[in-house]
Image: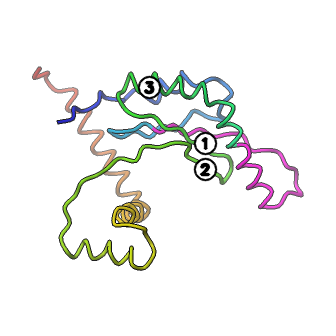
Amino acid sequence: MRSEPPPADDAAAWIAGAVPDGWFTEPPETVIDRDEIVVWGTLPQPDLGTDATDADRSAAETGRVHQFREDTRDRRIKVAQQLEHRYRRKVSWGAACGDTRELFTHLSAPVMTRLRQPERQVLDTLVDAGVARSRSDALAWCVRLVGEHTDDWLRQLREAMGTVEDLRRQGPDLG
């Protein structure tokens, strides 16, 4: 049985202190679950002048993200190793520049589930239609689709769960 990782309540602040000044235009966004910490940083947009097309901007943003990835690789690895030791979670990095967002590395965690025939038929339809390569891809597609259409509800649910966790910590230590 796998033990739960330690709380990561202070991870965003720790990351903000560990990331070198000048990497990002604002404090990094930190997304945490029980398996992974994803650190998103916003990069300054390249100045292309007023004559640049949308394609030029997109290419420049992609170039900025790729160059950041190459230039910061060694330092990001060191910060990630410290984070992984401290919080017992894998660490992934991503960067955003204008409309371009790229996640450099990320954890793909296996999830076991039992599905009845109607649920399997949904997945098989997505595979047969070419929407997904496998049942696993189809299930991931469904989860993303639900997530896109229920962001507000999921945000409220996570906030409520955070409040419950805060109340638990304030309660007596049953040691």
Q: Which residues are magenta?
A: 38-64
Label 1 to label 2: alpha-carbon separation: 6 Å
Q: Element type at marker 2?
A: strand
Q: Which residue is at 16% across, 27% downward?
A: 171
Secondary structure category for the residue under label 3 = helix
How would you rate the neighbour count of disc 3 (Cα within 10 Å): few for under 14, some for 14-19, many for 20 or more?
A: many
Q: Quadrant of residue 153?
A: bottom left
1 and 2 marks in contact (CB < 8 Å): yes
The picture places residue 76, in percent across and down from the top left corner, at 57, 28
Q: Which residue is mark 3?
A: 83
Q: Is residue 102 above or below residue 11?
A: below
In the drawing, does residue 135 fall left or right of residue 30?
left
Instruction: Let me know if residue 50 is in the magenta part.
Output: yes
Residue at the image point whose x is 67% and y is 46% from the top: 97
Nearest the camera: 146 or 70? 70
Contact flag, marks 2 and 3 (Cβ < 8 Å): no
Q: Which residue is tagged 1?
A: 95
The quadrant in which residue 119 appears is bottom left
Tell me: 14 left or right of 74. left
In the orientation shown, which residue stands out farthest toward the left?
174
Which residue is nearer to you in this view: 158 or 52? 52
Q: Quadrant of the N terminus?
A: top left
Residue at horizontal 19%, vertical 61%? 114
Residue 166, horizontal then vertical, whole percent: 26, 32
Q: Where in the figure is residue 139, as x and y percent of width and height?
A: 34, 64
Pointer 1 or 2: first along the chain: 1
What crowding class fits label 1: few (fewer than 14 Cα within 10 Å), some (14-19), or many (20 or more)?
many
The three-letter amino acid code for the residue at tag 2 is: Arg
Which kind of residue does numbered mark 3 sit on?
Answer: Leu
Q: Position of residue 81 (x, y in %)?
A: 46, 24
